[in-house]
Amino acid sequence: MFANRHVAVDHTEQRIHRIFQISVILKGFHAVIECASGIALYIVSGETIKRWVQFLTQEELLEDPRDFIATHLLDAAQHLSVGTQSFYAFYLLSHGLVKAVLVAGLLRERLWAYPASLVALAGFVAYQLYRYSYTHGFGLIVLTLFDIVVIVLVWHEWRVLERHLKRPRESS
């Protein structure tokens, strides 16, 4: 914990720090997936996306023509406009890049990254709740709950880091 600082911490703090690190790394993986998805949406045509979705859902729809996920995926692909595709490409790529920069800052214990992460994550939570009010997507609730946990962990880590930075170093 705080590898570049001389800090003594108890086992509970070490466990919390480890959970913080794991959650931030998971956020980093999610950021990479978002960036890759955003780039893919910029590169791949809407027609290609429709063909892929049709291919991926055809077996499930033959088995159950009213399959919830398959029918919704197919419907979304068929109604995918160039404007919608561009919006989601931009949203995913920008969202992913912001998270990647914040994750890098948090893992390097950069003080600017803690308040910036709190503001960004709070904004993401607000937007996800707004989107949930329209879509009622269960995934948005899961993502929002995870973001709230990360907010609490970032806040905790920031406070611990600031306490240790304010403490005078013990001479060796």
Image: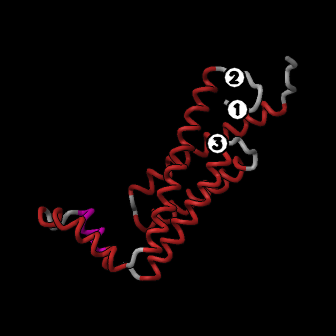
Q: How much space separates mark 1 and mark 3, taking CA atoms?
A: 10 Å
Residue 8 higher or lower than 39, as above or below: above
19 lies left or right of 9: left
97 lies left or right of 82: right
Q: Quadrant of the C terminus?
A: top right
Which residue is nearer to you in this view: 8 or 3? 3
Residue occupied by mark 1: 2
Q: Label 2, secondary structure: give it.
A: loop
> How far across and down, in percent of the image, does residue 42 sit?
47, 74
Name the residue: 56% across, 56% down.
Answer: 125
Name the residue: 76% across, 30% down.
Answer: 5
Q: Earlier in the sequence, mark 1 or mark 3?
A: 1
Q: In which quarter of the view is residue 24 placed? A: top right
Q: Amino acid at mark 3?
A: Leu
169 lies left or right of 37: right
Which residue is nearer to you in this view: 17 or 156? 17
Q: Amino acid at mark 2?
A: Val
Q: Contact (CB < 8 A) between labels 2 and 1? A: yes
Q: Quadrant of the N terminus?
A: top right
Residue occupied by mark 2: 9
Name the residue: 70% across, 47% down.
Answer: 114
Name the residue: 66% across, 51% down.
Answer: 117
Which span of residues is magenta-colored? 68-75
Q: How much space separates mark 2 and mark 3, taking CA atoms?
A: 18 Å
Residue 163 higher or lower than 130, as above or below: above
Is disc 1 surrounded by few (<14), some (14 to 19) or many (20+) residues within 10 Å? some
Q: Earlier in the sequence, mark 2 or mark 3?
A: 2
